[in-house]
Amino acid sequence: MREWAAFFVRWRVRVGYPLAVVELWLARPTLRSICAGAAIGAGGLLLRAYAAGYLHKKETLTVTGPYAVTRNPLYLGSAILALGVGVATHSAIACALLVAYFALFYYVVMRREEGELRKIHGAAFEAYAGRVPLFFPWLRRSAASDDGQSAGSFSFAQYVKNHEWQAGLGFLLVLGALVLIWWLRLGGRIY
């Protein structure tokens, strides 16, 4: 792995914490922006939860469920979640920073993970990659792989095993902070 790619993999989450502080500092939320952002973010959380229930990390090549329309439904869910946060902040600068962060870090991470999957699963991954796009989903589902390597249905136990609840908790904390900022900007009064 190239050294610069290793940086993006190692630091993608660590950079997210100070970015969250900057996002909150730039935020000028309104009740409407918080509600709209929460609705958008909830869609991202649902997609992440759905994908996590299918994903058996480092065990099988997952090609069913949301993995039949995009090879990276977790990251697509994260992008929708980030868009929700950007909308909730009611700040074009904050939203642009989130988009730039996601585009820069996660493109590199997706490509690196793709290389690892190619090494582990070989021809099965090549066939899958030929049928299913990297990120932006096709509206039609690809034919499921018949290689016997993929888990076939959603599992709540797998969702829990993948610790996906942490994304929801993080989103709720950010929304809570934005509600607090909104309330403080009102002088602590509800109108």
Image (tube, rainbow, N blue to C red):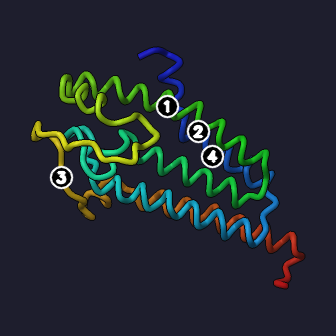
Q: Looking at the image, is 4 positioned above or below residue 54?
A: above
SS at badge 2: helix
Mark 3 vs 2, N-terminal side: 2
Badge 4 vs badge 3, beta-carbon distance below 8 Å = no
Disc 4 vs disc 3: which is toward the camera? 3
Going 54% across and 36% down the picture, which residue do you hit? 12
Q: Looking at the image, is 51 positioned above or below residue 37?
A: above
Which image quarter holds the N terminus?
top left
Going 31% across and 59% down the picture, which residue do you hit? 159
Mark 1 vs 2, N-terminal side: 1
Mark 4 vs 3, N-terminal side: 4
Mark 3 residue type: Gly
Q: Give the alpha-carbon distance from disc 3 to disc 2, as whole Å.
A: 29 Å
User: Mark 2 sits on what residue?
Assistant: 102
The image quadrant of residue 40 is bottom right
Going 36% across and 39% down the picture, which residue do you hit? 71
Mark 3 vs 1, N-terminal side: 1
Badge 4 vs badge 1, beta-carbon distance below 8 Å = no
Q: Residue furthest top?
A: 2
Image coords of residue 38 (percent x, y): 61, 66
